[in-house]
Amino acid sequence: MRLINKFTTISFYIVRWKMSGKVIFQACVIGMLSTGMYVVFTKNDRVQSPYQKKDRDKECLCIGLIVTIVSALLLLMTGKSDQLVIKETQTASLNYKPPF
């Protein structure tokens, strides 16, 4: 009985890790894409000093991190379970009678 419980617990964590990894990957992709769009749309063509460049890098990093965290939370809250549902199968009977 203990072996079955341990196996069930281990399999639960493996499934949970796979789902979490998928969500984290999707959140990182969303964060990178949105940060890239932010950088492109708020690009400044003027020459910047090194201090302004560091501030700009910190700003982009902060925005990317916020977007990644929020998207991960939203994906976790709205995600559906990937578990399979086993349905009972019934034998299908052929009906040759007309509907009238």
Image (cartoon, rainbow, N blue to C red):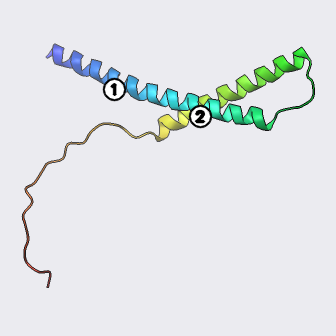
Label 2, label 1: how far apart the Cα atoms are: 23 Å
- Residue marked by disc 2: 30
Along the line of sight, which residue is nearer the eye, 49 or 71? 49
Answer with the quarter of the image where residue 69 lies.
top right
69 with respect to 59 (left or right): left
Residue 87 x/y as whole percent: 18, 47
The quarter of the rendered structure image containing the N terminus is top left
43 with respect to 34 (left or right): right
Disc tally is 2
* Picture residue at 65% right of the left edge, 25% below the top: 65
Answer with the quarter of the image where residue 60 lies.
top right
The residue under label 1 is which amino acid type? Val
- Helix, strand or loop for disc 1: helix
97 with respect to 58 (left or right): left
> Neighbour class for label 2 at 10 Å: few (<14), some, many (≥20)?
some
With respect to residue 100, does 73 lie above or below?
A: above
- Helix, strand or loop for disc 2: helix
The residue under label 2 is which amino acid type? Ile
* Picture residue at 71% right of the left edge, 29% below the top: 63
- Residue marked by disc 1: 15
Residue 92 x/y as whole percent: 9, 60
The quarter of the rendered structure image containing the C terminus is bottom left
* Picture residue at 58% right of the left edge, 35% below the top: 71
* Picture residue at 63% right of the left edge, 29% below the top: 32
Residue 62 x/y as whole percent: 72, 24
Along the line of sight, which residue is nearer the eye, 42 or 88? 42
Answer with the quarter of the image where residue 30 lies.
top right
Q: Earlier in the sequence, mark 2 or mark 1?
A: 1
Say if mark 2 contacts mark 1, CB within 8 Å.
no
